[in-house]
Amino acid sequence: MELENIVANTVYLKAREGGGDSNKGKSKKWKKILQFPHISQCLDLQKKIDVRYGYVVDQQPIGRFLFREFCERLHPEYHTYNIFLDAIEQYEVESDENRSDLAQTLYKRYLQRDASEAVDVLNAEVVERCKERLSPANKDVFDECSSAVKAFLEGEPFHQFQESMYFHRYLQWKWLESQPVTHKTFRMYRVLGKGGFGEVCACQVRATGKMYACKKLEKKRIKKRKGEAMVLIEKQILQRINSKFVVSLAYAYETKDALCLVLTIMNGGDLKFHIYNMGGEPGFDLNRSRFYAAEVLCGLQHLHAQGIVYRDCKPENILLDDTGHVRISDLGLAVEIPEGDMVRGRVGTVGYMAPEVIDNDKYTFSPDWFSFGCLIYEMIEGQAPFRARKEKVKREEVDRRVKDDTENYSHKFSDEAMSLCQQLLKKSPKTRLGCQCGRQGAREVKQHEFFSCLNWKRLEAGMCDPPFVPDPHAVYAKDVLDIEQFSTVKGVNLDATDDTFYTKFNTGSVSIPWQTEMIETECYKELNHFGPNITRTPDLILDAPPEPESKGCFPFRRKKLTARMRPVPIHVDSTPPPAPPTVVDNSTPNSASATRNASAGQSVPADSTVTTSATSTSMSVTVTSSTTSTTMVTGTSVTISSMSTMLSTTSSGTKTVNSVS
């Protein structure tokens, strides 16, 4: 082994283990990188992002944490409802033998009217219907109760959350999430492999220490091959998918020479490596094959549910993570199919393409089920169904075998495994397993007897133990010097016409993976603190005066207030009322003005004078005060300073911020 490869592997493994200090791979300045901005800089985000309960609480990891904390600290009765929802989730993934007892326990603890933790927002009819369904102990017995509790929480409780400091903290996290991403965001490590447009290398986020795989797509190579549409489609599909069984896109950014996709790193290698290179006879036993097939099936189900056909299911594209779970990777050939439509395209890998793809016929999701059958066959048999490993045969002959020949089954196959492969490898999509239910074809495949011993809820929750766990001290990749390098692209020049494409690609952080990273690396735990006795910290106080700069003997060593910590005027869209101009009494604010300020969570100093005049198109606000604070009058904000200030704001004039996923 060359010295260069030893050094590259050593540095990479050291980074995977979190480095040698207590920061676990984080930069020494990580807290400065993730410093919260002043809340006044974040309020405009409410107009740019989804702020409904179904998104903030059900989909956003940090939003869920903050809503739970709000309920637990300020409204214990709401917290009880959240605990009930957690108990239902636990019930759904419980083993079959224990589910019946757990159902009775949940009913007695939460649904009986005399229970100490009774969920009192459920009406008697819902509780009675739930009670009638307890005896079979189906997985969906509490579904109606769960929906009713969520419907309650998304009402008044969520409205109260939106008016609290916890929601403002959520906006601060979203502001950090929306910050630009560049090459300086990461440390780069050894090359792990190569793709169609460039190399794939390991990388680490400086602020959190989280490891990823960075897929670099060379700009000139993309332009030379006219691959702009293909690259953008792959990026957009990866950005949409949030599944345990498909690699996740965490960041997308550009450098001078490349477009970069930062993806889930899979340190365990691919299935092809494990099928053929782990010693002994090629292939896996039935249990291991079943486990990998089930997780790939879940990944295909999530893709198809989004209307996406994968078209490249093969062992090389199924990767193992540190714990032995697998994910689908490389969505470069995937395409979205609108509801009711079909596509045509002769794309895929020779020996795994379905007959209808070879014949260039129209199709929907049927090619994925054929290639899924090829994958299962190869895992069990130790070779592909229509081509032996390293067999020298022309592409036309392999295509002929796929269309005409029947695969052979050895003693390695059980009756159930052979039946599954035979049904998946049917030549006609009309008779192939999984092809009769459109986007829901995975449900049909899951019901096959080969998978009858699995608890799908537990498997989908990641609660099933993998049959093989990769060695954490091994690098499942070719030696650095064995990975073929790309040649230099000549005769291609980049110009301003390419900028539109690069702008669509360069979108920065992806919301759910970014928030998950903050939680997993404990950055959320270390940064998400509030003031004593559940009060706002200075960065959350809208009308707080700026903190004075620290003084010292040496001016050049004085710490200055950073830009993100400076309060800014708060611009909020408003519809001026049709009432005539009103002058507020200098001594006592009127009730309407007080109500508006109270609803905004702010106050007007007693020694302030506020005069408003409104027309159908603009609003002028004059403020005189001896203190410094921020106030909001009929939806238009001004900064109150030590001198009289006149601001005029049109109702359509708003501050522009970067869009946030």
Image (spheres, rainbow, N blue to C red):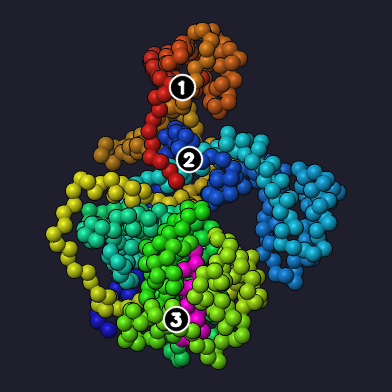
Report which residue position mark 2 lands on: 49
Q: Position of residue 495 (x, y in %)?
A: 18, 48
Mark pair 2, 1: CA separation: 20 Å
Residue situated in front as seen by the camera: 412 or 284: 412
Report which residue position mark 3 lands on: 404
Which secondary structure lies at badge 3? helix
Which secondary structure lies at badge 2? loop
Q: Position of residue 84 (x, y in %)?
A: 71, 52
Q: Is residue 371 covered in magenta?
A: yes
The first of marks 3 and 1 along the sequence is 3
Given the image, on which type of amino acid does mark 2 rest?
Ile
Q: Quadrant of the N terminus?
A: bottom left
Q: Residue at x 38, y 78 (%)?
A: 399
Q: Residue at x 62, y 35 (%)?
A: 160
Q: Position of residue 181 (x, y in %)?
A: 34, 50
Magenta-highlighted residues? 365-382
Q: Residue at x 49, y 84 (%)?
A: 406
Mark seen at residue 636:
1
Question: To which quarter of the image does residue 648 belong?
Answer: top left
User: Is disc 3 surrounded by few (<14), some (14 to 19) or many (20+) residues within 10 Å?
Assistant: few
